[in-house]
Amino acid sequence: MIPELGQLCLILALCLAICQMLFSLGGAHRGQHGLMAAGPALFSAALLAVSLVAVQTAHSVRPDIALSVFYLLALIAMLRLDGRPRPDLRAGAALGAAAAIKFSGVFLVPALIARRL
């Protein structure tokens, strides 16, 4: 029973991280130029929190939850690319982690290449 509880706590923490990263993907609430304002970013995070598919997936231990975390980390890192090596390293590390978790993580590579051009 205890290992199952630990796994579910990990999945819960990852799901909460996904909601927070989806909200921070907007960036406008921190005074940065982001994809959206604070209102739509909060609305999209709230929709994810009550999504039927997300709730059903969260009740089982699957690699999709961790893939979503690293996918969003890679997207956020790609938005912050500015020619310095540190943001490139962050985007590459998140992309590598996403690809290591599940093969569909490599589908973000064309976006990284397009962003670098």
Image (tube, helix red, strand yellow):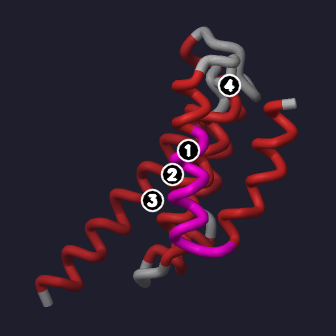
Amino acid residing under circle 1: Leu
Instruction: Give the Cα separation between the discs numbered 3 and 1.
Output: 13 Å
Spot occupied by residue 74 in the image (x, y as percentages of width and height): 61, 44
Q: Which residue is mark 4?
A: 81
Which part of the image, by quadrant, shows the C terminus? top right
Amino acid residing under circle 4: Leu
Label 4 sits on a secondary structure element that is loop
Amino acid residing under circle 3: Cys
The reply to whether the magenta stretch includes residue 107 is: no
Q: Quadrant of residue 59?
A: bottom left
* Crowd rating for badge 3 (residues with CA inside 10 Å; few <14, some 14–19, many 20+): many
Q: Which residue is mark 2?
A: 18
Label 1 sits on a secondary structure element that is helix
The label nearer to you, 4 versus 2, is: 4
- Main SS category, magenta section: helix
Q: Inspect this view and state whether residue 40 appears.
A: yes
Q: Residue furthest bottom?
A: 1
Q: Which residue is mark 3?
A: 15
Drawn side of residue 20 relative to residue 92, left or right: left
Taking depth in this image into account, of 4 and 100 the one nearest to the observer is 100
Question: Does label 3 or label 4 sit earlier along the sequence?
Answer: 3
Drawn side of residue 3 relative to residue 83, left or right: left
Drawn side of residue 27 relative to residue 90, left or right: right
Amino acid residing under circle 2: Ile
